[in-house]
Amino acid sequence: MNPLIPVVVALLGVVIAYASYRKGRRDERRAEQQEADRRPNLHLDLRSASYDFDSAGDLSWKVELSVTNRSDRPTSVSAAVLRAHYLAPSGHEQIAILGSEEGSDPTNLAARASELLCLDFRAPGAAFGRSAPSSYELLLSDAHGEDWSLDIGIANREDRS
Amino acid sequence: MSRVGGRRPQKRWKQEWQEVSEPVQVVGNAAMATGAIAGGQLVPLLIVDVADRPELQELFRLHDHLREGEADTVWGSRSSRASTVILVITFRKPIEVEMAIEIVPEVHGGLVDGILQSRAVYLQSGQAGDRLINAPDAKRILVSVTTTGFGDMWVENRDSALMREFRSKGLSKSQARVAVQEMNNRWSEILALRMSDGTE
């Protein structure tokens, strides 16, 4: 028998084992990627945000943002909340949590799709001492229980024009 | 007056309490009944001293403007004093803040029965000596209280505390048992009062 045959067989075994290992790793990575794609993954992109005091002294905020569902799984945004940082009369910094107005809550998001969301928030101006809160954080909750946040600056509507 | 409703399911009754804020003092109490709230049942009112809790002062102030809120409630007790009941209210709107209220069964036992029955409690900020009758238009928050798993344990807890209280005042065991029963009957009569909403 040719003495090289066992060596060739051993080398062949190593090559087959390595190919099998590579395939296993590739399948594992693909499964992980598929799982990641199925997890909710929203990307928030602020388009515009403004506030104003109306004639009744109420503060109203309007926020427009593009929401992209980067996952392969349809989802929906179940709630939108604006966290407004303001100075309380006692002098300490406080965060008020404002829910979006009824009817402005979005929306179903197909897989890999984008939607433009228009959100309205309102509160009596007196609650904040007739000066708008200093900074804001927008939070969206999706149907799968994940929260997505975005720090935003909100300009006075009159100052912007 | 503003109203706060619960959103999430009630957590289980906690026998031991951990990591809650320092309880606020109940400096006064009363009960109110209106036809529109809790089916006209008596709803307990707790006057709590929040003078050293600016975030709770802000809660009362802001609630007066923003009206609707959101809160979760859970009942608990202290391991060092098992008979004492603590009602922890976690407000989520209009601000996120936790209020723990310590209730001593021997002093405020009927209030817990009232809260459990009406599933609600009014909160009003004040100082020692404040009474409902002196400030009928004071700002109040109405909190919806969930009771899962707590009611049965409370009855046992309350009766034991009352027994100890009557025994410490010199009553025999059988006399104390009768006194506890009479006291519970009296509270049941009071809590059975209903205010009609005028539609009947």
Image (cartoon, coloured by chain):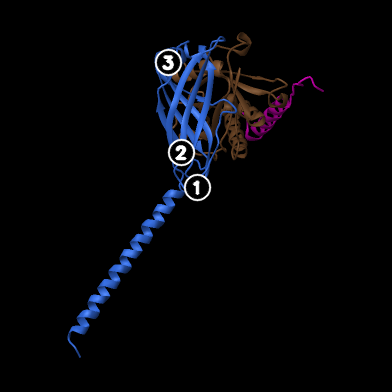
Chain colours: A blue, B brown
- Front residue of A7/B109: it is A7
> Where does label 1 land, which residue?
A73
| Residue B116 percent coordinates (x, y) | 63, 31
Above or below, A160 against B159 in this view is above
Q: Residue at x 60, y 32 (%)?
A: B163
Of discs 3 and 1, which sits in the foreground?
3
Question: The disc labelled 1 sits on which kind of residue?
Answer: Arg
Above or below, B77 against B56 in this view is below
Q: Is residue B174 magenta?
A: yes
Instruction: Name the quarter where the C terminus of chain B is drawn.
Output: top right
The residues bearing labels 2 and 1 have C-alpha atoms spaced at a distance of: 12 Å
Question: In this rendering, would B88 be left or right of B132?
Answer: left
Which of the chains bears the disc numbered 1? A
Which segment did they paint magenta?
A: B171-200
Which of the chains bears the disc numbered 3? A
Mark 3 vs 2: CB contact within 8 A: no
- Front residue of B198/A32: it is A32
> Where does label 3 land, which residue?
A160
| Residue B44 percent coordinates (x, y) | 63, 23
Instruction: Name which of mark 2 and mark 1 comes first in the sequence.
Output: 2
| Residue A12 percent coordinates (x, y) | 26, 76
> Where does label 2 land, which residue?
A68
Above or below, A75 against B183 in this view is below
Instruction: Name which of mark 3 and mark 2 comes first in the sequence.
Output: 2
Q: Which mark is residue A93?
A: none
Q: Secondary structure at mark 3?
A: helix
Instruction: Name which of mark 3 and mark 1 comes first in the sequence.
Output: 1
The residues bearing labels 3 and 1 have C-alpha atoms spaced at a distance of: 38 Å
Q: Secondary structure at mark 1?
A: loop
Asked if labels 2 and 1 share a chain, the reply is yes
